[in-house]
Amino acid sequence: MDQVRIGRFIAEMRKKQNLTQRQFADILGISDKTVSKWECGNGMPELSFMQPVCNILQIDLNELFSGEKLTDADYKMKAEENMMALIREAEKGKKNIVGGRVLGCADHVKLSVSEAHKANTEFWSTIGSEFLGATALPSWGAFFPSEERLKILGELSGKRVLEIACGNGRSLEYVANLCAAELWGLDISASQIARSRSFLESQGMDARLVCSPMEDECGLPTEYFDLVYSVFGIGWTTDLDQTFRRIHTYLKKDGTFVFGWSHPIHKCVSVENGRLVFSNSYFNEEWYCADMSDKKIMLSNRMMSTYINALSNNGFLVEKLIEETDREKAHASDNDFGRKALMLPTVFVIKARKL
Ligand SMILES: C[S@@+](CC[C@H](N)C(=O)[O-])C[C@H]1O[C@@H](n2cnc3c(N)ncnc32)[C@H](O)[C@@H]1O
């Protein structure tokens, strides 16, 4: 499906109807940004808009997918071509990469914060760690250099430290052993908080644990922490700006924020028959819902610029962005994920300072 060609065709036919992007968008009840996105070839009308778009532009679906007006002579051939392209497109759209897995059944959805929180909490309270694997310091993720080598958290002795999305508490144990003075953790799942609590108690460690979505006001002290960090936690937020704004308030001036997450380029490339195939658009930040065994997760893939700009817009200075693969580990792995990690970053870590 040639989105650029289709976009140009939409623009041409819209102008033929003497409509501005805004007027066209108003009739459809959407924003003119969406129309501009289609016309620039950066997306297609969603299924529910396809017929209304055709009606307004006085074209049919076959012409929309072909990106041109069709004569009777080429109508049938184009219909078959378009049908095949649609089937291929449907296959592609269902490839979503979470952690090291390619999920075959991820559908784009409109974000509902309450549904995302419900689904993700249920997932992490039950099968999350076993299904996606827990990642705890000193690991920042598979095939990524470990904290023992990076030392990106800096000197922790005597520091007040908060972990966002603390999961089962293993990373808090790691920072406790680096002599942090105070340990705090936050997680949306009461079961994860309970796991953290009992694990840390079993290690004779004391932590203050708060059960809340990271996006929400939850009574954490402000201007208090020297370090806020998160290991595969931040990407679960439904509101990146709000989350960074809150983290900014928890930190003391010049305090440090370090987080790691799945690298956005990793989400775009799948391994098919030993070859790397670019299978998802890097620009696609739509929310999707994916089946994970008998549970669901709701997530979106964010571009690197989205993270960097959200930090900058919320009072942080980015000090370091690490995109690296531990080549020794990746070479030793002898699996597709490892082979992929030799070609592109699968994890990133950002260190930022509160201004
Ligand atoms: C991959 S785990 C990260 C924790 C830890 N590093 C680990 O690997 O176990 C993701 C954690 O994020 C939590 N989480 C998901 N959505 C959240 C949200 N909106 N706010 C706070 N925590 C959230 C989950 O409950 C889960 O414990």
Image (cartoon, rainbow, N blue to C red):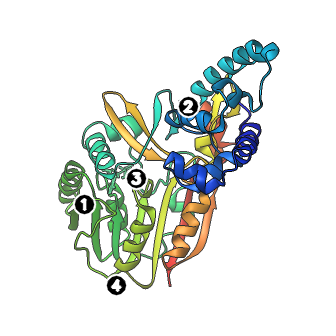
Which residue is denoted by mark 1 in the rendering? 212
Which label sits in the foreground, 3 or 2?
A: 2
Proximity of marks 1 and 4: CB atoms separated by less than 8 Å: no
Q: Earlier along the polypeptide chain: callout 2 or callout 4?
A: 2
| Amino acid at circle 1 | Ser
Q: Which residue does the image show at 68% across and 42% down from the upper left? A: 342
Q: Which mark is residue 236?
A: 3
The CB of the residue at mark 1 lies under 8 Å from ligand 1? yes
Q: Earlier along the polypeptide chain: callout 1 or callout 4?
A: 1
Towards the viewer: 166 or 318: 318
Q: CA distance from mark 2 to mark 4?
A: 53 Å
Q: Earlier along the polypeptide chain: callout 3 or callout 2?
A: 2
Question: Circle 2 sits in a helix, a strand or a loop, which is it?
Answer: helix
| Amino acid at circle 4 | Glu
Question: Circle 3 sits in a helix, a strand or a loop, which is it?
Answer: helix
Q: CA distance from mark 1 to mark 2?
A: 42 Å
In the picture, the quarter occupied by the N terminus is top right
Which label sits in the foreground, 3 or 4?
A: 3
Q: Position of residue 72 (x, y in %)?
A: 78, 15
In this rendering, would 175 be left or right of 87? left
Proximity of marks 2 and 4: CB atoms separated by less than 8 Å: no
Which residue is denoted by mark 2 in the rendering? 51
Q: Which residue does the image show at 74% across and 34% down from the upper left? A: 2
Residue 263 in view of the camera: no
The CB of the residue at mark 3 lies under 8 Å from ligand 1? yes
Q: Which residue does the image show at 63% across and 57% down from the upper left? A: 323
Proximity of marks 3 and 4: CB atoms separated by less than 8 Å: no
| Amino acid at circle 2 | Gln
Which residue is denoted by mark 4 in the rendering? 223
Q: Residues within 10 Å of mark 4 (few under 14, many from 20)?
A: some
Q: Position of residue 187 (x, y in %)?
A: 28, 57
